Amino acid sequence: MKSFPTLALVATFAVVCSLNGFVRATVVESCGATRTLVPIEENIVDISNCEKGPCRLKRRSTVSINQKFTPTEDVKSLSTTVFAKIVGLPLPFVGVDGTSACPFLFAEDGQTKLDCPLKAGVPVVYKRSFDVLEIYPKIPSMTIHWELQTKSGRSITCFEVPAKIQNNGTDLIDASNLRIRKFNRTLTVFDGTFELYHDMDDDYAFSISLSYSTLGNNQFILSPFRIPQQHMCTFLKTTYRDYREFYRNSTNLPDVGTCPLVAQQYYVKNKVLDSKLINNYFQPGLWRVDIIILKKDVEYPLLSMEVLMHSIILVASFTVTLLLAIPCGGILRVILDFDRFETVNGSAFVNTEKFRVRKYNRTLSVLNGTGELFVDLDNRYAFGLSFARSAQGNNQFNAYPMKLASKPICDFLGLYYREYQHLFLNYSNLPFVPEGGLCPFPKGKYWAKDAYIDTSVIPLVVPEGLWRCTFNLVDTMTGELVSQSFMFVRLSKEFM
């Protein structure tokens, strides 16, 4: 799995490209084993504010893409397949992936509107713009896969480019060195440094709002507790004064009344959240603190940061974790446990009745058993995976924006299967797919022995809960869903 439906997850592009004589291009890469009608060398791609990867995509900003290509055959329809590969797992772009590309086509001048079908030998410009949403997690390293396909799944153009999703305050402040760490068996502290790049005076405004989740399931309700928006100098002379003594000995933040806030490196050393600041009106649960900094004449906030606090005993203990403001490596690890495997239909194609989930040891469940495929699978069939999550583990599932896009089976084998086959070949007799691909997928009996999921491929941004992975096999000639199976796994996290 990878929203984690992204996370998840999550990214986007934009373009302002003059096509009358001069064309600015972004350096992009081919899509590996994906065979396209138009080779990568015959595409001109321009991503806004990015000449070479990794492209920096800032949340709460709008990005676009311009792509110029010339089809060598007539193309009746065109759809968009867009996802971010995070640790090798695809996170589709919400609102873009799976949509028609036909409304976004223009002639070579970039102005004259075109539509499908496309004519062989006629240059086309594809232009798309959309938002990098606030819900997208901060991802320091990923690869964007951008593909235009026909209705049957044939790839017309495809490119990939390295990218990263950043907070929209990275030009103002770098908080990547701030950490949450265990101080002793019972206490967690805030530690590290952050760099302020610009002096902050009354051209900047500052506010804090609070939200709470009573069940701790990230379903937040806005709380009436807040610090209203104030100009920075006003804040430093008033509200800041009331709380300065609580962190004087653990930081080098300026004295009360100092303005502007000087651009320099600041530190926080072993800071404990003082429960004396919390009154009895705060109910137990997971609390989110939103810190927003705005600048005069700038439409979007320069900085939007979230701090999550979990209240175990309201006035006694807090665990504080900075999400979206610091990298998440090295603190938590993901735990995946098989729950069950089900086949809904497709008995004429596959028999999975003998697959079982069993406990391997106290902490691990594994998949065992044999199954049989009755039909050789070639490009007449398309295969894809989608994911849904039950936050409370009660089988009430919500579709998650994460999937392996449906592709003709031979293309699927050459792209996704080949990329992940190292995860399961040691536990099964499934066929090895070489660099040249495999087609068809041969019928026969297949077994799995003590198979489990390597959690190192699961990004930490994927949320906890009961997950359902849906396997769909479709006959592209009739449109019939010929086989559907479900695999259920429970995802949790723990401190290392």
Image: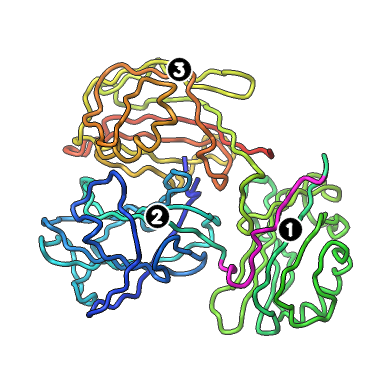
Query: Crowding near pointer 2: few (<14 within 10 Å), some, many (20+)?
Result: many
Q: CA distance from mark 1 to mark 2?
A: 31 Å
Q: Which residue is mark 1?
A: 192
Indicate the quadrant containing the C terminus: top left, top right, bottom left or bottom right: top right
Residue nearer the viewer, 1 or 142: 142
Name which quarter of the figure residue 469 lies in. top left
Under circle 1, the secondary element is strand
Q: Nearer the viewer, mark 1 or mark 2?
A: 1
Question: Taking 11 as reference, is 388 above or below it?
Answer: above
Please tell me which residue is depicted at 85% across the width and 56% down the height of the picture: 274
User: From the viewer's perspective, is 106 left or right of 241?
Assistant: left
Majority secondary structure in the magenta region = strand
**Is 215 included in the stretch rendered in magenta?**
no
Q: Upstream in the sequence, badge 2 or badge 3?
A: 2
Q: Measuring from the top left, give residue 26's x and y in whole percent.
A: 35, 66
Magenta residue span: 168-183
Q: Which residue is mark 2?
A: 144
Please tell me which residue is depicted at 34% across the width and 44% down the height of the picture: 405
Which amino acid, by three-letter code, is at mark 1? Gly
Q: Measuring from the top left, give residue 327's x and y in whole percent.
A: 61, 53
Query: Crowding near pointer 1: few (<14 within 10 Å), some, many (20+)?
Result: some
Q: CA distance from mark 3 to mark 1?
A: 46 Å
Which amino acid, by three-letter code, is at mark 2? Ile
Under circle 2, the secondary element is strand
Question: Taking 118 as reference, is 35 above or below it?
Answer: above
Please tell me which residue is depicted at 70% across the width and 48% down the height of the picture: 214
Q: Measuring from the top left, give residue 7's x and y in whole percent.
A: 50, 49
Q: Upstream in the sequence, badge 3 or badge 1?
A: 1
Residue nearer the viewer, 387 or 481: 387
**Is 176 included in the stretch rendered in magenta?**
yes
Q: Looking at the rendered structure, which numbered label has been put on residue 449? A: 3
